[in-house]
Structures are given as structure tokens and as C-alpha cells.
Image (tube, rainbow, N blue to C red):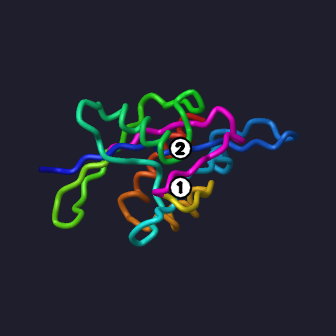
Amino acid sequence: MSLRACGLIIFRRLREASTPPSSAATAGNNIEYLLLQTSYGTHHWTPPKGHVDPGEDDLQTALRETQEEAGLDPGQFTILEGFRKELNYTVRDRPKTVVYWLAEMKDNNAEVRLSSEHQAFRWLALKEACELSGYQDMQAAMREAHQFLCARG
């Protein structure tokens, strides 16, 4: 039986008070992604995600896990229509599927409150987020999310 987990790639757009909204060509320069560092294993960095509980659908899981792991409730972000990324890989000789949606913070100053599963968090530009995440498939998912955002302007 395959393991299944779901989560959110959470981002925020930074704007300087004196700078008008940027064009689509430069829009990606003001985006930061939230990564959490696990307090177990290799202490890897990942967006909030977790295993699907019995009776939950995938999106319910992503919302619950985000609230549990980062202290962010669904009223603090907006899930963007049109982006859903499914990753498939093997963990301890078992197939695993992880589904991510893309969510934009409504308030850039919202407090992130970590659960005991994580020891640190960072808001990072795409390049740094990819370097910290380490896993090729997660890096590809984040790049795809970034391209999706840049295309939207």
C-alpha cells in the first residue's frame, strides 16, 4: 500500500512601499516561500505536509497539516486555483505520493508557530528555497510553482 501525504507550498509577495507593483518579467523577484526544518531524522527542510487521516480528502489534509505544523489557519492564506503538483517517490522501500497546492499569505506578518515536529522555519527566495530543500523533486515542484506565479503576473 502506498503512503499518501498532502501539503501546501506557501508563499508571500514582498513589496517596498515606494515601489509600484512589478511587471510580470520581474514579479518573481519579490516572492518568498515558507520552509520548515524537521526536528527528526536528517532535519530536512520542506513545506508543511503530512499523512492523510482516514476519512479526510487530500485538501483537508493539507489544510490540517499546515495548521498543525506551522500554526497557519485557512483564513490566513488563499489557495490558488490551477496549481496542484503530485510527487511520487520511495521511502523505506515503500511508494509514497505527496500532493501540494499553492497558497498565498494574506498578511506577510502572520506569525508562524511551529509544532514539535519542526525546529525552525524560513521565508526564502526560490533559489535559496531550492538549495535548502535538497530533494530534486521538491526543487522541481517549487520551480514549477514559481513559473506558475510568474506567468500570472
Which amino acid does the dot numbered 1 rest on?
A: Leu
Q: Which mark identifies residue 10?
A: 2
Quarter residue 138 falls in? bottom left
Residue appearing at x 16%, y 66% in the figure: 93
Disc 2: CA contacts within 10 A as few (<14), some (14-19) or many (>=20): many
User: Is 50 placed above or below 75 here?
Assistant: below
Where is residue 97 shown, x and y percent of the image?
A: 25, 49
The span shown in magenta is 99-117
Where is residue 5 shown, x and y percent of the image?
A: 31, 46
Which amino acid does the dot numbered 2 rest on?
A: Ile
Give the overall secondary structure of the magenta segment.
loop
Q: Which mark identifies residue 35?
A: 1
**Dot 1 lies on which element?**
strand
Residue appearing at x 46%, y 48% in the figure: 48
Residue appearing at x 29%, y 31% in the figure: 57
Quarter residue 129 falls in? bottom right
Q: Is residue 108 magenta?
A: yes
User: Is 44 placed above or below 35 here?
Assistant: below
Taking depth in this image into account, of 50 and 33 the one nearest to the observer is 50
